[in-house]
Amino acid sequence: MSSRLFSFLIYSESDFALAKEIFNEFKERSWGIFEPKGGLKPKMQSLTKDIAVNTGLCIALLMGDKPSKELVHEIYVARSFGLEIAAVVPKGEGVPEEVGFLGGSIIDYPSPRFFENLERFFVHAVWEHPFERERCDYTELDYDFLKEASSWGSPKEKDITKCLKLPLGAYIDAPFHGPMSIQRLKHIWIHGPKEADKTSYVKTLLLALLLQNNCRTLRVGVLDFDDELACFEQLKNLKYPRARDVASGDALIGLFIEESLRRLQEYDKADFARDIEEYYAKTGKGMPYMVLVFHNYKLGTLMDESLYGLTYACEYAGIYVIVTSEDEPRLDKFDTRIKMTSKYTPIEIKLAGEDKPILANRPYLSDTDFNRLLMKYIRK
């Protein structure tokens, strides 16, 4: 029996011999199997959207003690496309914890019925294949998808932003990205080890805000001691110069606190307006939202008190703080807490008032697409 869909092999170079055996046996049995251009090679070809829509089953070889980051990455990409995945493991062993969700799809190797079992998985996967699927790649957002962010929170009239939305991620087991308003999220603390690549994530969040706004509706501040956000140095929306050390960072926080207090005084003059929306409704004057991004913050410094004071002062002033840190949050007022463990695993989003965290596939753009979108917001 053959199928117009094929199997796709996910393997490390160390498991190339087994991959080649499976490849040859499937061809011998006339079962569809993906053959890369130039034939099967020790280095696995990455799964793409075009390949995925013609794939009935992904066969992940997990024969080593610990799967490589690249192998885990490809398994999560396959899962994000909604594909069925069969885990091939040494006889009598389970799957590694990094891909624990494959526990119900194990095939032992070696086994006399190994290829028969693989065929059964293939039949089931082909039967379940939807033929039309929405792309939901956890590692990279489509250029056109993020470009649509300009319509998420279109400015009301010309001077006021009604809603800022952030593409936090694609919810696990749901075929869509769920942009959430920063008014709902409030201050955000993103934490995890250095290898979790928080930089790419926070760059994508900030770019999404830029896409929805102009300089009249959004102003930005950046504290970046490691120069990992240097791409925002000449940002048109930058309220103050980027801070690069503790002294300039503390001063920048102070400027944001002053702006918060000034806004609250303006609200009082407008018959006790509560926030930007109410102030605009009563006066017809717009105030830009402000977002302070503090990258790679370390708790226990002299800046703790300043940052703590800012989150209290700007609660109603239309000013929000996004912090990335290796430290878990210990400061109040950070209602949204996002935990990252690596580039290749889902993120955990904990919202204030919610009992359980949301598990989401993380989005970020390729460097090429990111730079293409960012260029229109850079001073010439």
Image: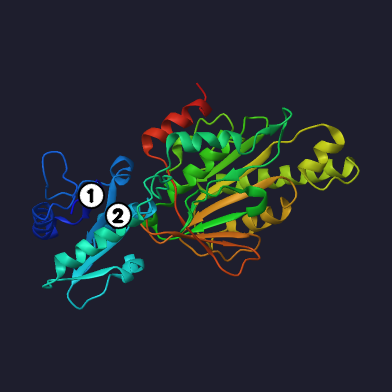
Amino acid type, label 2: Val
Depth check: give the residue in front, 279 or 114: 114
Please rate how many residues cluster around mark 1, counting C-alpha atoms within 10 Å: few if below 14, some from 14 to 19, many from 20.
Answer: some
Is the C-beta separation of discs 2 and 1 under 8 Å?
A: yes
The relative height of residue 116 versus residue 52 in the rendered view (above or below) is: below
Residue at the limit of the structure toward the front, as seen here? 1
Residue 186 visible, this angle: no
Location of residue 167 in the rendering, given as x and y in whole percent from the top left corner: 53, 46
- Give the x, y percent position of residue 361: 44, 54
Q: Which residue is mark 1?
A: 3
Along the line of sight, the residue nearer the viewer: 68 or 78: 78
How far is disc 2 from disc 1 in space, using C-alphas? 8 Å
Residue 374 at x, y percent in the picture: 48, 31
Residue at screen point 73% across, 30% down: 159
* Other-residue count near label 2 (Cα within 10 Å), few / some / many at <14 / 14–19 / ≥20: many
Question: Extreme top residue here?
Answer: 380
The three-letter code of the residue at mark 1 reads Ser
| Residue found farthest to the right | 271
Q: Choose the circle earlier in sequence order: 2 or 1.
A: 1
- Total marks shown come to 2
Q: Secondary structure at mark 2?
A: helix
Q: Is residue 168 left or right of residue 122?
A: right
Give the residue drawn at x 26%, y 54%.
70
Q: Which residue is mark 2?
A: 126
Q: State whether residue 101 appears in this view.
A: yes
Left or right: residue 110 compared with residue 139: left
Q: Which quadrant of the figure has residue 337?
A: bottom right
User: On screen, 75 above or below 41?
Assistant: below
Q: Is residue 281 above or below residue 81?
A: above
Q: Secondary structure at mark 1?
A: loop
Residue at 58%, 41% in the rendered image: 221
